[in-house]
Amino acid sequence: MALSERDEVEETALPAVLVRRSDLPVPLTHPARSFFGGLPKLPPQLEWPTAEVRANETLETVALTFVAQIDLAEVPGSGWSPLPKQGTLYFFCSSVFVGEGHPPCRVLYSPTAGGAYPDRAPPPDLMPLAGADGDAQVKWLDPTIDFHSKVEFKYPLSFRLFRDFYFLEDAVGGELMIEELCKALGPGEPNERDLLQFRRASEYEKDEHWPFNWLLITYVVRSVLSRVLRDLTSGSYYKPLTDEAAAELKRLRAGAIGWLERCRALTPMDDVDADTKAAFRSWLVDVVQAYEKMDGQVSTYTTQITADLGNAISHTIRCMVAQDVDARDDAPLRYVANLARQNHWKTPTVENGKYRHFSTALHQMLGYGSGPQDATEGAFGGHVIAPDTR
């Protein structure tokens, strides 16, 4: 009797492990033994991996970005997993992916537990996240003073067993995939709209919830200043700047420098009074309106200004929580919930399963290595992981 298509896909099932990170980061002192980001708890005999990466069209030898460590004693799979039952895996990778077909990566193995050693201090030649000129480089972070310009935020990891299937763009296989993921993770939450993504300047102007501390003002001003300085240097598509555009950019530069000087005199986590909040929102609206007038004359679009602002809000909340888990109470609840929700398992659709594309921070170990890959701030997953002690 011939097998149905569903039975044929079922016969390809392999056990695999889902790897999920916490919704929000934790302080570096958190006792997790398996975690994404942060600093590796490397044994003294293991060196922090280095590699040649491309920066500004030249090759430089740098210390690779630490991605995650996994204490194998915490990973389910006894009896079928080819991985050691004990010990710790350490993942490192280049953060430069633009123009790199095969970015250098290293996986180290130690037979010791994930909490056996203290955090390894970052080496002085640690590469900045996304590289000096990577598309995802956060322009408002300064590698000389901002810890999280080179070190990812720390997120504890958890693990769930599931069955992985071999199929490609197949509705039946996708249905099976969704069934298995829902068994492991539940039915999911509604895919609600991100509060900050694609938000217009007019919406920010009316939102009295920000800026909620001086660290956020610092990041927003730095992001604007980085755009202005770039536009003063290059113009639009390397066309010469008009006198009017140059004068407007210099005005914006002076305004940004003024705000930075105010920031330097204040404690980053201090609250911002209502009058200063209103003045800062007005300043940003002025920046956006100035760029609207310069449309086509410079490289920056107004949407990039507001996108930078949304990213700065989320980054500031991560900084607050990474400093003190109770600090989230000092940020607007709706922004904190919005950031956490980006990591939640969303109710999947048939198309999600068919193309193995899920809008959540979800990765896998073992199986076919072709599972969920659309993870926020993620850098490992979808590959059969094996130890490498070189």
Image (tube, helix red, strand yellow):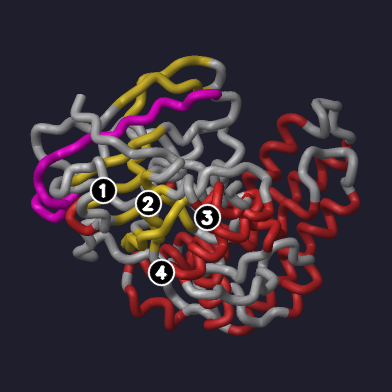
Magenta includes 111? yes
| Amino acid type for the residue under numbered disc 3 | Thr
Q: Is residue 245 above or below residue 319?
A: above
Residue at 32% x, 30% y is 106
Depth order, front residue of 217/185: 185
- Callout 2: few (<14), some (14-19), or many (20+) C-alpha neighbours within 10 Å? some
Q: Nearer the viewer, mark 3 or mark 4?
A: 3
Q: Is residue 54 visible?
A: yes
- Callout 3: few (<14), some (14-19), or many (20+) C-alpha neighbours within 10 Å? few
Looking at the figure, which quarter contains the C terminus? Answer: top left
| Amino acid type for the residue under numbered disc 4 | Met
The mark that comes first in sequence, 1 or 4, is 1
Q: Is residue 333 above or below residue 39?
A: below
Magenta includes 346? no
Mark identifier at residue 376: 3
For this orientation, the residue located farthest to the top is 58
Residue at 25% x, 41% y is 82
Residue carrying label 1: 80
Residue at 55% x, 21% y is 56
Write down the region rendered in magenta: 101-119
What kind of secondary structure does the magenta stretch mostly adopt? loop
Q: CA distance from mark 1 to mark 2?
A: 8 Å
Mark identifier at residue 320: 4
| Amino acid type for the residue under numbered disc 1 | Trp
Q: Mark 3 near mark 2, Cβ–Cβ under 8 Å?
A: no
| Residue 102 as seen in the image, left or right of residue 145 | right
Q: Mark 1 near mark 4, Cβ–Cβ under 8 Å?
A: no
Q: Mark 1 near mark 2, Cβ–Cβ under 8 Å?
A: yes
Q: CA distance from mark 3 to mark 1?
A: 29 Å
Mark identifier at residue 15: 2
Q: x, y (%) of residue 34?
A: 26, 56
The mark that comes first in sequence, 1 or 2, is 2
